[in-house]
Amino acid sequence: MQADFAKMGFAPYDPKIMRLVVKLRKMKPDDRSEQDMILETYKAALGMHARWGKRWKTCACVFARDCRLPNPCRVTAHIDIGRGPEGQAIGIDLAELLATRLLVQGNSGSGKSHLLRRLLEECAGQVQQIIIDPEGDFVTLADAFGHVVIDAGAYSPREIEELAARVRQHRASVVLALDELEVEAQIRCAALFLTALFDAPREHWYPALVVVDEAQMFAPAAAGEMNDETRRLTLAAMTNLMCRGRKRGLAGIVATQRLAKLAKNVAAEASNFLMGRTFLDIDMQRAADLLGMDRRQAERIRDLQRGQFLGLGPAISRRPVAVHVGPVRTAGRGGGQGLIPLPDAAEGAMEALLTDRLAEAAAAPQPVRRAPPPPPPRADLEEALARPRDLPEVTRAAEPLGPAPEAETPAPRPAPPPAPAPVNDGGTTPEDVVRAIALAEGATYRPAATSFRDFAIRCRQAGIASAHIDIARFRRMFAHAVSGLDQLESEAQTAIAAAAEGVDDDCLAPYLAILIAAHCGHAMPGEDELGRLYGSASPSRVRRLLDHLERQGRIVVREDFGGERSITVPLLPAAA
């Protein structure tokens, strides 16, 4: 090959151009077309292409006018965030930030949210912004800059994922407001949203800033009170954002109060840092390590004032620089930080204001709280089995029916005499015994074998034949009694029992309660009632039960992050 190129030097061929042609020929057609298009775009932007220069500028201006974006000729890649010690402007290179990510750290009250707001306001309209807001502080950006506020509590998990996909497709700047959710629901919702952003199709990989406030919640360094599944889900979402998000156009900006509480694999992926005031040695040492400071220089971090940060990184400065964040045009929804005068009140007026109609307010219905499960009843079955008792006499069929003679009083025994066992007069049935067991407090929390033994004992004590009832049939009779099915009319019982055919015995009672509510048009049983019928006080087990029934096609569950759950029955038995 080298000899061939040497011979070309004597022919009317340029060896350098031939090497370039060979290199282009080895490329895939799509890669070669993409490179040509990028080259033409840069040449046109620099005015080097006579044919495309004027056309490029005209098309860009028309596109900006139609999309209502700032004119590309006035778009800048450098945004101002504040002033340095000598009054000089300190800015951030937006193009570099999209490629290198940013970590913001500061204790509560250090101005961390103010810094994020300044950064978002300065680059609004230049790049897509996606904000994960656990406290609802950034929803005010919608009024001034047109951000779309997504109230996470109003949507189901599947709707949250679909919203994230549409956000990437339409390049909309949004604020995911999580303040109406509980902590674990916030974490799961944010994880699903971030994962859907990351999994968007390749044609929607547009550049976007993804700001995650209070990142220590979503990428904890140690396992806390959240369950393992939620922790794995949120750590995977945050790691994908910071480690692999750049190639998908996602530039992560994470803000945290405590570096020590933030997962190290998430913090280590940031190349730009803005460190605010902190007082704990462990956080100060980690901040100093990230800024390249020694122990003595790290003491500067304690002396920072509110709104002052030390910045370092390719998008900010090659050396640590102090910056005082500039003013913002919008404000958060939190309470004021300054002192305000206390209200003037006459003597005794404040006390009267606090105690006015207090009894009526206390008597008003309060939000329903999940009560602890009742303790299982004490079953003295062993004592009942060991206690001596008299079996009932069996009446012979040949004897004529008539008034029974008075029974003789049994002779006293040395042991305490047991209570006389009742004789079944034909009015008590096995269903009555099962109903009595089912209505006892805490009956559903007892093992099925224990309840079945209790049933057999009661039947023997009452003189009821129960040998034909095995434990499987007893469990179904128990489910009918505890769910209230035996209280309905016979036609309704038949229709509901037919709809419940094939359901597992342990799931039968809660499923019958759902069918009864759908049949009668009543409200669906809540989580506490379903847990009682299922024999468990664990909300996660109730959710797994509903998932199991939904996978079987017996119910349809829709649950949003606000905790509202709706259950429908596809095969609803007809009302009588």
Image (spheres, helix red, strand yellow):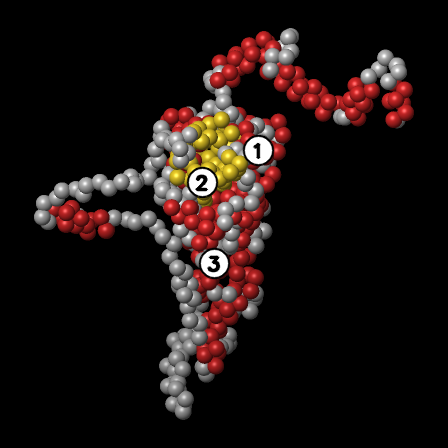
Location of the C terminus (image quadrant): top left
Q: Which mark is residue 20?
A: none
Residue identified by numbered label 3? 536
- Nearer to us of marks 1 and 3 is 1
> Looking at the picture, how far across and down is residue 329, in whole percent?
36, 28
Q: CA distance from mark 1 to mark 3?
A: 50 Å
Q: Amino acid at mark 2?
A: Leu
Q: Which residue is mark 2?
A: 310
Q: Which residue is mark 1?
A: 99
Please rate how many residues cluster around mark 3, counting C-alpha atoms within 10 Å: few if below 14, some from 14 to 19, many from 20.
Answer: some
First reached walking from the N terminus: tag 2 or tag 1: 1
First in residue order: circle 1 vs circle 3? 1
Residue 273: give x, y in percent of width and height: 49, 40
Residue 523 image offset from top left, x and y in percent: 40, 44
Q: Nearer the viewer, mark 2 or mark 1?
A: 2
* Mark nearer the N terminus (3 vs 2): 2
Residue in the image at 59% along x and 41% along y: 243
Q: Residue at x 39, y 31 (%)?
A: 87
Q: Is residue 556 visible?
A: no
Task: Give me the residue at 35% from left, 35% from top.
Answer: 332
Between residue 55 and residue 537, name the one nearer to us: 55
Q: Residue at x 42, y 36 (%)?
A: 323
Number of other residues with Cα within 10 Å of mark 1, as a class: few under 14, some 14 to 19, many 20 or more:
many
Q: In the image, residue 535 lies at what x, y percent?
A: 47, 59
The vertical placement of 462 against 481, above or below, is below
SS type, badge 3? loop
